[in-house]
Amino acid sequence: MDRPLGLLAELTYACPLHCPYCSNPLNLGDYSDELTTQQWLRVIAEAAELGVLQLHLSGGEPLLRRDLIDIVRFASGHGMYTNLITSASGLSSRRAELLRAAGLDHVQISIQADEQALSDRIAGMPSFERKLTAARLVKKLGWPLTLNVVLHRHNIDRIGHILDLAAELGADRIELANTQYYGWAQLNREALLPSRAQLERAETVVRAARERLRGQMEMIYVIPDYYSKYPKPCMGGWGRQQLTVAPNGDVLPCPTAHTLPLPRASVREHSLAWIWQQSPLFQRFRGTDWMPEPCRSCARRDLDFGGCRCQAYQLTGDAARTDPVCHLSPDHGIVASAVRAASEAGSPREAVLIPRPHPDTRRRE
Amino acid sequence: MPLTGPMRIADNADRPRLAPHVRLVYDQARQRHVLLTPETVTLLNGTGAAILEMCDGVRTVAEILAELRGRYDRVADTEVEAFLTGLVAKRCVEVNHG
């Protein structure tokens, strides 16, 4: 069994934004009993012991946790590479300087589009200008800046302008990742999934920008897996490289695995080492023994690990089937028909997005 | 534009160094060197670690190659250059030219 490389710490699901592509769970109320500072520090110490080298601090909006700076300092002290994934609301100069001093290595800021009206509309609140200010602050303090952009039907045609904005802000990296259809995003799938024509246009722009910005900006572009021939190697394999701790202490092989009908594992009841090595949850889809055909005899089984268990469950009702995204899957018709519908549907304006409600975004201890 | 920055490795007189946001560490748990970058962990073999330890912004690529030849029986110059060029493209390594 490999040791985990990275821990995604979802510190809180509270968030001031209302993005319709949010992949967090539908029932946020189940996560309001958040781990305390002391519990998080214990989790991080155990993770370091287990071999975790990177700590990704996310949510929700991790800046809503008052103890974020203590958590960063502690992880840094354990030699971890710390990465903050934020909407940037709450990243004041003072807070940023304290995070820098605490040893935070890297900041990723989400933007929803390249211009205010669209960005704010997608985010469900005025936030664009603050994001730009925060991005400049990140650069000023000498951090590397990554911009995260979730792409979908309503902003993918702006991709060239988004790249121009990233270059203007001096971003070192940009992640242009199409929406993954989990959690709230699944409710909005029809309104979010771009058409084939949109994707083809976007790829042309990305190819040209890659050449132009080579050595200046690292560019990661992820197409919607619905359009790929083979499934994504989800999390680099179940229980193989990564683990997630949800705000309530649940430990998961991937952030959406709470949707699966599997026994829970929580840091409130067990050590991280026991959960990684022995819990039924982490052993369920580890390796290749669980695989059905066509995965079992497929040459790619150690490359994509059968794809995403959550997607298999969501689309077929059986988490142990081949990810229907794979063109070899007997269930591929489900994905093919969604893609067909997206390419036939009319203008993106016709599709209505349901904003993610966040009833309570007060700071919590 | 100063004579430093994230550009291509142009020739053997370039002096590569690790980008400020990248960390080369020895991982006790795995007993090997790893390169930590924003989204990835790269487990390094002995040669990879040796090359990156010499990326100090002082040694030139030619000097790094010469030191490697002193340590290893076979050193493929093109592989070392490809390794560094790949890391430059990912902005993990920066270059002082000349």
Image (spheres, helix red, strand yellow):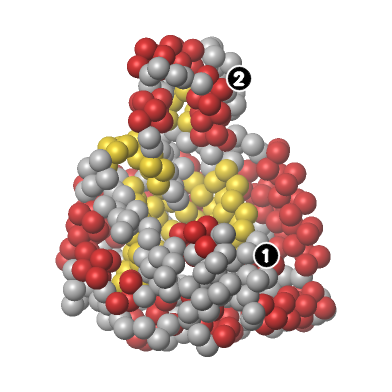
Q: Position of residue A266 (x, y in %)?
A: 25, 76
Q: Nearer the viewer, residue A234 or A136?
A: A234
Residue at 57% of width from left, 59% of height from top?
A: A299
Which quarter of the figure has residue B48? Answer: top left
Residue at 40% of width from left, 86% of height from top?
A: A261
Please state, as top left, top right, bottom left or bottom right, where the C terminus of chain B lies in the image.
top right
A343 left or right of A266 in image: right
Chain letter of disc 1 in the image: A
Chain letter of disc 2 in the image: B
Q: Which residue is mark 2?
A: B10
Residue at 62% of width from left, 54% of height from top?
A: A221
Residue A162: tell me if it is visible. yes
Which quarter of the figure has residue A337? Answer: bottom right
Determine crowd level at label 1: few under 14, some 14-19, many 20+ residues with C-alpha closer than 10 A.
few
Q: Nearer the viewer, residue A347 or A193?
A: A193
What's under tag 1, amino acid-wise? Answer: Lys
Asked which secondary structure carries label 1, the reply is: loop
Q: Nearer the viewer, residue A117 or A213?
A: A213
B96 left or right of B45 in image: right
Residue A66 higher or lower than B19, as above or below: below
Residue furthest front in the image: A297
Q: Position of residue A7 (x, y in %)?
A: 34, 60
Point out which mark residue A229 bears. 1
Q: Position of residue A115 (x, y in %)?
A: 67, 59
What's under tag 2, amino acid-wise? Answer: Ala
